[in-house]
Amino acid sequence: MDLSTADPDTVLDQLDRRLVCALQVDGRAEPGRIAEVLGVSARTVTRRLGRLRQTGVLRVVRLPDVEDAAVGALLLRVRVLSGAVDAVARALADRPDVPFVDVMLGGQEVGAVMLTDAGARDRLLYGQLPATSAVVETTTHAVLHAFADAGQWRAGQLTEAEVAALARPVVPRPAVPPPTDELDRALLARLGEEARQSHAALAGAVGAAESTVRRRLGRLDELGLLRTHATVDPRLLGMAVDANLWLDVPPGRLAEVGTALAAHPQVHGVFATSGPANLLATLFCADHGGLYRFLTETLGPLGVARAETTITARAVKRAGVVLRRPGADPRTGVRTDPRSGVRPDRHPDRHAG
């Protein structure tokens, strides 16, 4: 899909994109700080973010450290019978141990990421999926190393100075995982559902004093445990093509190629894997022409032996958040304007705050 032919009501305007990008840098940034950096009023920031969140377009969640998330992760490619893809995708998305689900172009493959223990893994792979008549074949890749994940991707709508002004201090990963108690884990779990909850809301949810919650979050932040991810359909940011590149890289160059791809601004995930392809890179492009240029100009010089390119037709679940389809009300199915949450034919006069 090219943006030139896309419905304008499915693409966010420039300010909304910049607000999403600000939350990509710091998902818990206060509206006042965002407003100061972006040069708009705090009222405008509050109103715009409120609309995006209330309509389900944007959700900010806490992510574990990329290395922690990669431990035990499985990448699933599930081939299904024609017409059954939605049912299989929904079933996978309903699982709490499956944070990412995509329907691939062609409608006969579902891609998913699974984070679970061996028991749940085996029940799914050797019991539930084979017993499902709609499933034709399942290919499973174990993640061996994560070079980059979705929490590190930036949509590129901010200047370097704006990113630097919003960024939290970089916290080195400790050699030994920091100890956490029951209250810490309860707070992290709540932030995993919605990272922009206030201290007061979190205090009420976990049954602790607000001052205690504030102090605990400060400690967790210092330990590098408050990494966030702004979850939004990439098409709303002007990225109409979401592609997976399954790469065959000479083992001696695997680290070099993985590191190089992880640094590219279009790439939102790079993982060394088991299986016939030993490296997976996921990237966003504005259109198919952009994907072609990435393959020829970026990937080509890296000396990759073989590349299989698959394109996501629809993102179903990202970072544990089930996405609604752009332009449709999640309750009624009536198409809405993502900037305001109202039907386009009933849209009030647009104005900047």
Image: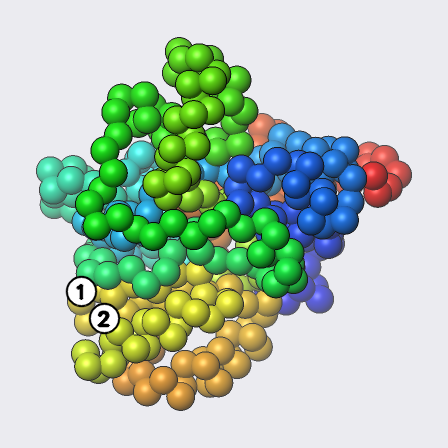
In the picture of the structure, the residue carrying the numbered disc 2 is: 278
From the top left corner, tell me how far across and down residue 279 is, in percent.
28, 69
Q: Residues within 10 Å of mark 2 (few under 14, many from 20)?
A: many
Q: Give the structural element (helix, strand or loop) at label 2.
A: loop
In three-dimensional space, the C-alpha distance between marks 2 and 1, rounded to whole angstroms, equals: 6 Å
Label 1 belongs to which residue?
Answer: 274
Residue 43, horizontal then vertical, whole percent: 76, 33
Image quarter in which the C terminus is found:
top right
Q: Residue at x 25, y 25 (%)?
A: 181
Left or right relative to 297: residue 55: right
Return the x and y of residue 52 as percentages of the image width and height.
64, 38
The kind of residue tagged 1 is: Ser
Is residue 11 found left or right of 276 in the rendered image? right
Secondary structure beneath dot 1 equals loop
Q: Is residue 85 above or below residue 341?
A: below
**Residue 158 in the image: x percent, y percent?**
64, 58
Density class for disc 1 (Cα within 10 Å; few <14, some 14-19, many ≥20) is some
User: Viewed as shown, does residue 201 lie left or right of 349?
Assistant: left
Tell me: residue 177, above or below residue 313. above
98 sits to left or right of 313: left
**Quarter of image, res 305:** bottom left
Disc 2 and disc 1 in contact, CB within 8 angstroms: yes
